[in-house]
Amino acid sequence: MCARIFVIAFIVLVSCNKQVSSPHSALSFTNVTVNAGLADFKHVSGAVGDKWFPESMGSGCGFIDYNSDGWEDIILVGGGDWTERSSNPSPALYLYKNNKDGTFVNVTDESGLGEINTYGFGVCIADYDNDNDQDFFFTTIWNNYLFRNDNGFFIDASAGSGLEKDSLWSTTSIFFDANKDGFLDLFVGSYVDWSPENDIWCTLDGTTKNYCTPELYNGVASRFYQNNGDGTFSDKTEAAGFLPSPGKMLGAAELDFNNDGWPDLAVASDTQRDLLYLNNGNGTFDEIGALSGIAYDENGRARAGMGIDVGVIDKTEKETIFVGNFSKEMISVFRHSNGNFFDDISGVSKVGRPSLMTLTFGLFLLDVDLDGDLDLYTANGHVQMGIEETQDGIFYREPSHLFINDGNGVFKDVVPLIGGPLSTPIVGRGAAYADYDNNGTLDILVTENNGPAHLIRNNNINNYLRVKIKSINSNRDGIGTKLIAITKDGRMIRKVKTGSSFMSHSETTITFGLGENRAVDSLYVYWPNNKTDIFLDIESSQEILLVESNEN
């Protein structure tokens, strides 16, 4: 590995006002959904009273710069109607173009996405064909879709792609370069073997039908597809070591806990053991979840894993896995210790107890207050309407959690302190983040099951550095790139990635919160192909574009 020092030549956005951090009580957020033009969206569960299992799950959301103008647009999954019950099915997808003034306009039809008739769940966004625009993969309860971006118009590229399979209930997906050949591979999570014909009758009160839990259904194994580099994929699920699998997967996140340069996968599974796939560097993976200590709770039980994310949260510089779980199951927090082993720090992190009674779906790490460390946001909401009538302390609609990191990996939920839109009880499901208004702060997008989406603007102001990555020799999005920013206060470690959260996609631009620092002293960029670039003395409050050099 050779290290080379370069001068940054391309600055995209500069904001000159330098600010200092504010205390937690000064954090504030504004629900801008209506003013932003997103009020016409409503997720449709298709529910008409039969309590079919998929109706309780909700859908994902994502940020996508579909027209490559440097402003994050929004894609929302509409769910869907059961086709045999509706002559006018609801839209499966919604695409909103960013007008660059804080508002969005619905461009679903003109972008080629207006005629999709299905029951949708999640999106994952990446430039899978390396043509310098953002494509996306769309999971459904029937057949999945691969959409290729052609100058802002999406073409259904599923046929002939190698992704056509038997009808499966797919959930979360993640693009990552498993073999580091410069083309993004695809891991697709599958859930359970459900159909209207095998729907099971379940009840809470012994009289009326309600939604079942996944324990009553057989899981369906997830699938792994290798990118062939020509727009097609090959099913390598078995050859790569992803079988056997318990299924019921709802979240996946990329990590490299052993720092060998090869991307591993952490997988959240619903009522099954959580999984950890160790990349052997030869096209195969070993599943070591139980060995590593992340598979079960302290009593040896599998939890109802939903959303997932991974990041470095403290000065140990070890990666930590966060998994959202069911009510009466605290959020899982596992920090890498050594070798293949992780420590359960749910309690000492102070995340466990405040999350015990909520049901967490969407979950991600972000530097919400721009102080240099990663905080934790969760979208919460139960699956059973009327749950409060049968269980004390548990509610169908729940407020979000926003856990602020003290810099040492100890968190405090500030939502009860700051109030505002994050304290509003919702039936939270998918969640993602991005700086949609290009002011340096990270904003939050969250969906509700059978309800609206919410765009939450972050009003916090602080010094920052935003870094957009463009790779030449690796995959164009630079997925898998590791960045280390160094200031007088320490080191910040971030990774460019897709996946994470719950069936949703956050922006891939990296945000370093700088607090009172006016500059980044040095920025180390570790590209997926093992090259390293070093950039020095970068002023704060700007966005920069880093393009990988062609040099060997």
Image (cartoon, rainbow, N blue to C red):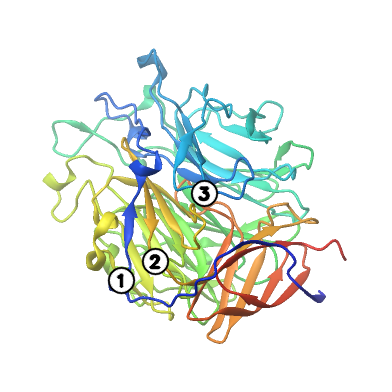
What residue sits right under mark 2 in the picture?
460
Residue 334 locus on image (x, y percent):
45, 69
Which of marks 2 and 3 precedes in the sequence? Answer: 2
What residue sits right under mark 1 in the picture?
26
Residue 123 locus on image (x, y percent):
52, 41
- Asked whether 443 or 115 is in front, the reply is 443
Query: Which label was assigned to residue 505?
Result: 3
Estimate the spatial distance between the alpha carbons at disc 3 and disc 1, rounded to whole Å.
Answer: 28 Å
Circle 3 sits in a helix, a strand or a loop, which is it? Answer: loop
- Work out whether 546 lies above or below 111: below
Query: Which label was assigned to residue 417?
Result: none
Q: How many numbered markers are drawn? A: 3
- Work out whether 247 lies above or below 511: above
Which of marks 2 and 1 precedes in the sequence? Answer: 1
Q: Is residue 9 visible?
A: yes
Estimate the spatial distance between the alpha carbons at disc 1 and disc 2, rounded to whole Å.
Answer: 8 Å
Answer few, some or many: residues within 10 Å of disc 2's Cα (few below 14, many 20 plus, some between 14 and 19).
many
Callout 1 touching callout 2 (CB < 8 Å)? yes
Q: Amino acid at mark 1?
A: Ala
Estimate the spatial distance between the alpha carbons at disc 3 and disc 2, rounded to whole Å.
Answer: 22 Å
Answer few, some or many: residues within 10 Å of disc 1's Cα (few below 14, many 20 plus, some between 14 and 19).
few
Q: Residue at x 27, y 30 (%)?
A: 51
